[in-house]
Amino acid sequence: MSTSRLHLTYTVARRLGSAVHQRAFSLSSLHQKSFGALVQEIKDNNKDIHHISPKDLHVISSSCSQSPPHIIDVRERHEIESTGTIPGAIVLPRGILERDVGKILKQDDPRDVVVYCAGGFRSILAAESLTRLGYGVIEGEQDTLDNKNKPRVWSLSEGFDGWVKNGYSVEKK
């Protein structure tokens, strides 16, 4: 094999090896992140997701407000069947949220959206999906024409468990 051909083969192998190593490294980093770490990262970095306590949601949903928030339960059907939901909640399990939310909520609906799960973790992921789909207001741009009618996206801290722990009513489905 000629020296130039050997050098070319070596260079290609080295680049390919480097690319494979980088890909393997990025995949190993991805697999090593825990669910809790992912949720915390989203909470820390996505400023379009707001957090609401069970007490504050109860006050808002119980008041005579003209435009109460949409409340979306993202738990699985078997969880809902055994425990019920927050009264008036829309059942839209996490697995189909992105696909079906547009059938229920319009992008220009001015009402806020509150998502919840059992403990407040899956709802963070659901809230992130909603903001990525265009729901929610980008901080600092609340008064722009494009964002004027967009609802804010909230995640219920402590989830349904927190709602029940505070003694609020539950609707059986």
Image (spheres, rainbow, N blue to C red):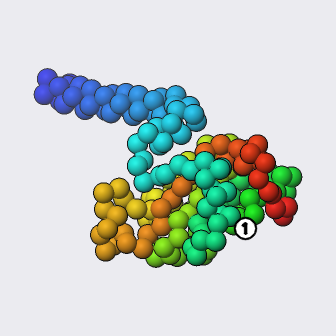
- Residue 17's quadrant in the figure? top left
57 or 138, which is in the foreground?
A: 57
Question: Looking at the image, is 67 positioned above or below residue 34?
Answer: below
42 left or right, relative to 139: right
User: How many numbered badges does the structure rendering display?
Assistant: 1
Amino acid type, callout 1: Gly
Question: Looking at the image, is 24 positioned above or below residue 106?
Answer: above
Q: Residue at x 42, y 47 (%)?
A: 46
* Whole-percent x, y for residue 40 in the image: 51, 36
Q: Residue at x 56, y 63 (%)?
A: 113
Q: Is residue 145 visible?
A: yes
Quarter of the image where the N terminus is located = top left
Q: Is residue 133 visible?
A: no
Q: Residues within 10 Å of mark 1 (few under 14, many from 20)?
A: few
Quarter of the image where the C terminus is located = bottom right
Q: Residue at x 54, y 55 (%)?
A: 154
Q: Which residue is mark 1?
A: 88
- Residue 26's quadrant in the figure? top left
168 or 153, which is in the foreground?
A: 168
User: SS class of the residue under badge 1?
Assistant: loop
* Whole-percent x, y for residue 74 in the image: 67, 56
Q: Residue at x 72, y 67 (%)?
A: 88
* Residue at far left of view: 4
20 left or right, relative to 113: left
92 or 5, which is in the foreground?
A: 92
* Residue at far front of view: 64
* Whole-percent x, y for residue 59 in the image: 64, 58
108 left or right, relative to 64: left
* Whole-percent x, y for residue 64 in the image: 64, 71
129 left or right, relative to 24: right
